[in-house]
């Protein structure tokens, strides 16, 4: 399947109101072709490198159509909840969490990227939008977006084709993954299968494997 990279975003660090923490959530669209390597896009920065960025979170993709859900929930966000506002690098339509699987491999521009995990929503989403519980809303609805790791460096630009070239886990959509890991007491067998999924971020795989073992010990 193919779709189009509609808009490419990069950004430097800026203070995030109201406390003023330095954050890379502020992005601006670019029409230039941007080099991408294992740690992300050239000229793009992340403020909290413990939770953002790095090889398994090199590029962030957020479906543009999700912003309509924010506006439906909070009408005052019309004109604010627009592509790029949540710090994504890639925006477009035609791909969402029900269609994308853990481990999917895409050719975008001259680069090859692999889906490694959903984005875990944090408080910065609420602060960026200026509404309480926006992060909780993302988690509850599963409109998380996702991260890629870079398998083959290259360059990206708005208008590039996003072409899926491999799918190692056709049963493990991001939506089903999100639902499974947030069950109060998931099936340990399911967690073990998820932990073994090719392409899943290593820290997530380790965490789900540990949880499966703990659940088995509890009986």
Image (spheres, helix red, strand yellow):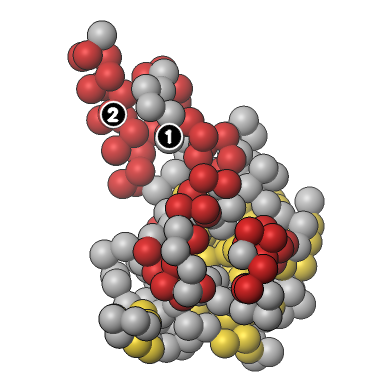
Count of marks overlaid on the render = 2
Q: Name the residue under label 1.
A: 181
Give the image location of residue 203, x and y in percent: 31, 46
Determine which of the numbered discs, if any, sits on residue 211 in the image: 2
Residue 173, relative to residue 217: is it above or below?
below
- Choose the circle earlier in sequence order: 1 or 2: 1
Q: Is residue 55 visible?
A: no
Mark 2 Cα-neighbour bin, 10 Å: few <14, some 14–19, many ≥20: some
| Residue located 37% across and 64% down the image | 123
Mark 1 Cα-neighbour bin, 10 Å: few <14, some 14–19, many ≥20: some
Q: Left or right: 6 with respect to 80?
A: right
Give the image location of residue 26, x and y in percent: 48, 83
Q: In which quarter of the image is the C terminus?
A: top left
The answer to which of 156 and 207 lies nearer the viewer is 207
Give the image location of residue 204, x and y in percent: 35, 43
Residue 31 location, quadrant: bottom right
Determine which of the numbered discs, if any, sits on residue 190 in the image: none
| Residue located 62% across and 73% down the image | 77
| Residue located 49% across and 61% down the image | 134
Q: Element under label 2?
A: helix
Residue 16, relative to residue 93: is it above or below?
below
Q: How far, Cα to Cα, is label 1 from label 2?
A: 10 Å
Q: Do the residues labelled 1 and 2 touch (CB within 8 Å)?
A: no
Q: Can residue 148 be seen in this view?
A: yes
The answer to which of 83 and 116 lies nearer the viewer is 83
| Residue located 38% across and 89% down the image | 14
Give the image location of residue 154, x and y in percent: 57, 75
Residue 52, relative to residue 43: is it above or below?
above
Residue that lies at the very extreme toward the top in this rendered image:
219
Q: Left or right: 182 with respect to 1?
A: left
Residue 19 location, quadrant: bottom left
């Amino acid at each position: 399947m193919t779709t189009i990279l509609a808009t490419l975003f990069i950004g430097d660090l800026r203070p995030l109101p109201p406390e003023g923490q330095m954050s890379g959530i502020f992005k601006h669209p670019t029409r230039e072709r941007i080099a991408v390597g294992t740690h992300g896009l050239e000229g793009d920065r992340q403020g909290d490198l413990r939770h953002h960025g790095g090889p398994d979170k090199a590029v962030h993709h957020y479906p543009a159509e999700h912003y309509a859900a924010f506006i439906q929930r909070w009408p005052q966000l019309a004109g604010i909840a627009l592509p790029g506002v949540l710090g994504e690098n890639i925006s477009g339509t035609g791909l969402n969490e029900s269609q994308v699987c853990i481990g999917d491999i895409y050719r975008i521009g001259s680069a090859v990227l692999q889906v490694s995990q959903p984005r875990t929503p944090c408080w910065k989403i609420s602060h960026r939008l200026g509404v309480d519980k926006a992060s909780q809303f993302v988690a509850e609805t599963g409109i998380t977006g996702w991260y890629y790791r870079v398998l083959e460096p290259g360059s990206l630009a708005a208008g590039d084709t996003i072409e899926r070239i491999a799918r190692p886990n056709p049963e493990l959509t991001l939506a089903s993954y999100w639902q499974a890991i947030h069950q109060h007491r998931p099936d340990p067998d399911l967690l073990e299968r998820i932990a073994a999924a090719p392409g899943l971020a290593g820290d997530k795989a380790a965490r789900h494997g540990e949880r499966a073992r703990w659940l088995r010990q509890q009986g």
